[in-house]
Amino acid sequence: MDVRARTCEILSDLIAFPTVSSESNQALIAYAAGLLEECGAKVDLASSPCGTKANLFATLGPEMDGGILLSGHSDVVPVTDQEWSSDPFVMEERDGRLYGRGTCDMKGFIAACLAMAPTYATQVNARPMHFAFTYDEEIGCFGAQHLAVDLKARGLTPGVAIIGEPTEMRVIEGHKGCYEYSTHFHGLEGHGSAPDLGVNAVEYAVRYVAELLQLKQRLRAMAPAGSRFDPPWTTVNVGALQGGVAHNVIASKAQVDWEMRPVTASDADFVKTALRQLCDEELLPQMRQTYPQAEITLETIGEVAGLEPMDQNEARQIMAELTGANGADLVAFGTEAGIFQALGMDVVVCGPGSIAQAHKADEYLALDQLDQCLTVLQRLGRYL
């Protein structure tokens, strides 16, 4: 069986595992572990804190620093309320495309890695090949963050990481981070006719939002010189403001859901420091004059580091050679790449399929994209 046919066979099996982020991925991970163990890989599985999900980290060759890591997430987004032309968890080939939930985001890349593993096992020498398949990327990159902790504990840092998100096999060297929060305000309920006897959580939440909007404007002027991002500055978005129960009741609770997409980690620190000062020096003291038990709490939904373009990047050099690309691009969507970069790896994002098909009904991976991916992965073997 040729490598494309084998990849399609594995991909069909992977699609049949309904690894929506709300469900377990353990059956898929066990399947991938079995294939890697068959070709001699040392496989480590790590359960999530909830015990229903798992990461896979596997190594062909010596377990040492400096190897090449191929990484992908095993979870997919839901199909609820989407109108599919076929069963989303049964892969179908039509008109040169492979249809199914996760075909491009990003089980196609995982299938290609698994199909290539037996070949890599014969090529690996002084430089190891690692595989990392994670959980819960779609809801906060929790699996990759868990894996980062495990790799630190083992003292193991691959030299190069290739994250196979769908980029149409373009080499991507940068994307912004994605930090999501909910800020909760706890005041004192009362009658609207006596505002001084209560602490209106909604009013303080509005002042918090006003600060976010001011920071949003200030960040425009802080865009790094020569930034290639679009837009070039760190963005802030207020997604929701909730609170109150009636027109004539002083609101005791409010919640602000917001996010920022930092260009640099220092921008994220700037925003969080400004908000903390606002709460500690203005809002909370005023709230507690009337109600000493008043609170403002920041809930971190997820902080996914961005991938910062680097002057020296071996992963970019390797993938530029293998793909024939003259340079590397930036993208707007987030990935797990920044988590691996923070560990000290040289990282790029490069994988088959288009992000335009991801998360939609009738998600597909074009066979010519899969062929391009397999060609690059076959060429990658020379670096082992």
Image (cartoon, rainbow, N blue to C red):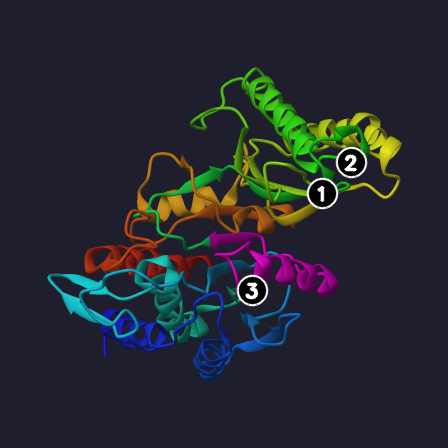
Please tell me how crowded label 3 is: few (under 14), some (14-19), or many (20+) other residues with Cα within 10 Å. Answer: few
Please tell me how crowded label 2 is: few (under 14), some (14-19), or many (20+) other residues with Cα within 10 Å. Answer: many
Residue at the (32%, 65%) spot, across then down: 101
Label for residue 252? Answer: 1
x, y (%) of residue 190? 74, 40
Left or right side of 45 for 297: right
- For residue 226, above or below residue 129: above
Magenta stretch: give its range.
135-162
Q: Nearer the observer, disc 1 or disc 3?
A: 1
Distance, label 3 to label 2, CA atoms, is 69 Å
Choose the circle earlier in sequence order: 3 or 2: 3
Tag 2, which secondary structure?
Answer: loop
For label 2, the residue is 198
| Image marks 1 and 2: residues in contact by CB distance under 8 Å | yes
Distance, label 1 to label 2, CA atoms, is 8 Å
x, y (%) of residue 346? 55, 46
Q: In the rendered structure, which amino acid carries the disc numbered 2? A: Gly
| Image marks 1 and 3: residues in contact by CB distance under 8 Å | no
- For residue 368, above or below residue 39: above
Residue at the (36%, 60%) spot, across then down: 377
Q: In the rendered structure, which amino acid carries the disc numbered 1? A: Ser
**In front of the other: 70 or 101:** 101
Choose the circle earlier in sequence order: 1 or 2: 2
Tag 3, which secondary structure?
Answer: loop
For label 3, the residue is 126
Tag 1, which secondary structure?
Answer: loop
Q: Is residue 228 magenta?
A: no
| Image marks 3 and 2: residues in contact by CB distance under 8 Å | no
Q: In the rendered structure, which amino acid carries the disc numbered 3? A: Ala
Q: Nearer the observer, disc 1 or disc 2?
A: 2
